């Protein structure tokens, strides 16, 4: 991931991505977007049609990425669980990220489990970023103690 670009690169990937919360599969896709950015594990964005109906409700929070633009945040529901502010999307992304429009990224630390091609994802350290760590991704990663100034 140290050879990932800055500004981030957006890729279409044909990988099976699964998100589980409250014992329910709330998202499952075989084609999604992946964003690669220097010092971060990849973030996967799932199309709205690949997310279980009713799993997302507005969290009322917004954030801003210098590259992708203004994001809206989502509460995520599955089974008997609700995770507040546990996903985000870009309703009007910057032109170079227009394909991400309304695709949703999930914080893996807030879900029961997230998988890429059957491999269980480990969350990016620190809780602020939403990177998905698999065996194919080598750190260190921004987000853990002592990495704020990278």
Image (cartoon, grey):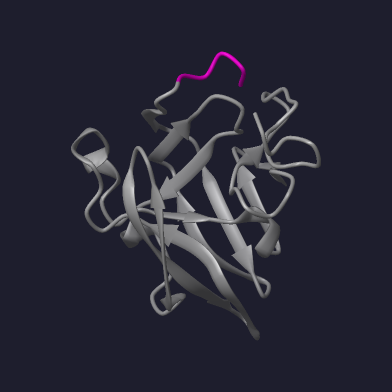
Question: Which percent across, then down, holds residue 49?
Answer: 32, 61
Q: Quadrant of residue 99?
A: top left
Residue at the image position 66 percent from the left and 33 percent from the top? 149
Residue 67 lies left or right of residue 143; in this view the side is left
Q: Is residue 149 above or below residue 102?
A: above
Q: Is residue 97 above or below residue 37?
A: below
Residue 132 lies left or right of residue 28; in this view the side is right
Question: Which percent across, then down, holds residue 45?
Answer: 42, 47
Question: Which percent across, then down, holds residue 91?
Answer: 26, 58
Q: Quadrant of the N terminus?
A: top right
Q: Quadrant of residue 23?
A: bottom right
Residue at the image position 64 percent from the left and 52 percent from the top? 114
The residue range painted magenta reads: 1-5
Q: Residue furthest bottom?
A: 80
SS assignment for the magenta stretch, majority: loop
**Is 2 contained in the magenta span?**
yes
Residue at the image position 69 percent from the left and 55 percent from the top? 127
């Amino acid at each position: 991931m140290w050879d990932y670009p800055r500004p981030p690169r957006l890729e279409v990937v044909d990988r099976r991505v699964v998100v589980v919360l409250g014992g329910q599969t709330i998202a499952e896709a075989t084609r999604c977007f992946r964003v690669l950015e220097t010092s971060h594990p990849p973030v996967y964005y799932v199309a709205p049609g690949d997310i279980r109906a009713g799993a997302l409700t507005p969290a009322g929070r917004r954030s801003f990425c210098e590259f992708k633009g203004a994001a809206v945040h989502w509460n995520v529901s599955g089974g008997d669980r609700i995770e507040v502010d546990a996903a985000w999307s870009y309703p009007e992304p910057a032109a170079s990220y227009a394909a991400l429009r309304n695709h949703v990224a999930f914080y893996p630390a807030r879900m029961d489990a997230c998988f890429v091609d059957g491999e269980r994802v480990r969350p990016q350290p620190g809780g602020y970023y939403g990177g998905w760590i698999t065996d194919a991704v080598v750190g260190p990663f921004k987000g853990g103690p002592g990495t704020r100034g990278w």
